[in-house]
Image (spheres, rainbow, N blue to C red):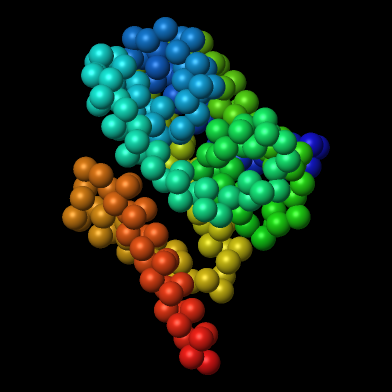
Amino acid sequence: MLAALKDSASVGLGLVPMGLAFGMLVTQAGLPWWSAPMFSGVLYTGAFEFLLVPLVASAAPLVTVALTALLVNARHAFYALSFPLHRVRGRFAKAYSTFTLSDEAYAMTTGNQASTWTSARLVTLQGLMHLYCIAGSAAGALVGSLLPDSITGLEFAMTALLAVLALDAIKERQGDAPTPLLALLAALIARVTMPDQMLLAAFLLFAAALLARYLAAHRRTRRA
């Protein structure tokens, strides 16, 4: 558990500002302050939390909210394919680990450095990340009303954090240069062809490209 605390410290430096930004966004949208920690605690979906604020503030239909949640969070279905859930012991621990499978948790637990992490270390790491977001959201909501509306760009904290995690993953897997190139190509194609649903389209294209590369490598191995 102490090791998980050390592991999560650097990510917490990004998650807490992200929570602060989200809390401020909630209060500036006219929602009660307790909505911020509630959203972060119950939903805990990162990008969708930011999208949910204007939907709730504008009283969007429930169907619209549900469809948006499905499209934005569909990426977690791909995360589950390689997340080490088999190393988490206990039904409650597995359920909580599945619930808190965030972008940051996936990036940290699927690398080579996490191949020997125990169940307690994995679940504690995810729990600390969850706590960072809740605490940051609560703090941001409480101080959000004290800040002027002219402050902008706080929502970029999440994008910056994910960019750093992506760069760390690329450095760790230096011999796997085609993977980030495929991801970049999928994002560019999705941006041009389906800008309104770019995230979902990019993930589908990326998954298809990885599957095609795997099948091609498997065929070369069989021929050899």
Residue farthest along the left direction in this orientation = 193
Name the residue at 50% across, 49% down: 79
Q: Is residue 178 above or below residue 83?
A: below
Whole-percent x, y for residue 11 in the image:
61, 40
Image position, residue 119 (x, y; %): 74, 43
Residue in the foreground of this view, choosing between 28 and 107 = 107
Left of 170 or right of it: where is 193?
A: left
Q: Position of residue 12 (x, y in %)?
A: 62, 35
Identity of the residue drawn at 45% across and 67% down = 179
**Farthest residue in the right direction?**
2
Where is residue 87 drawn, in percent x and y?
70, 48
- How many marks do you count on the picture? 0
Q: Look at the picture and state if 25 lies above or below 167.
A: above
Q: Is residue 165 visible?
A: no
- In the image, 173 versus 209, the foreground residue is 209
Q: 58 left or right of 8?
A: left
- Kindly identify the residue that appears in the image at 46 percent across and 43 percent down: 76
**Residue at the limit of the structure toward the bottom, as seen here:** 224
Image quarter where the N terminus lies is top right
On the rendered structure, is 187 left or right of 181? left
Q: Is residue 34 above or below residue 63?
A: above
Q: Nearer the viewer, residue 217 or 1?
A: 217
Whether residue 157 is visible to the viewer of this picture, yes or no, is yes
Kindly identify the residue that appears in the image at 61 percent across and 54 percent down: 110
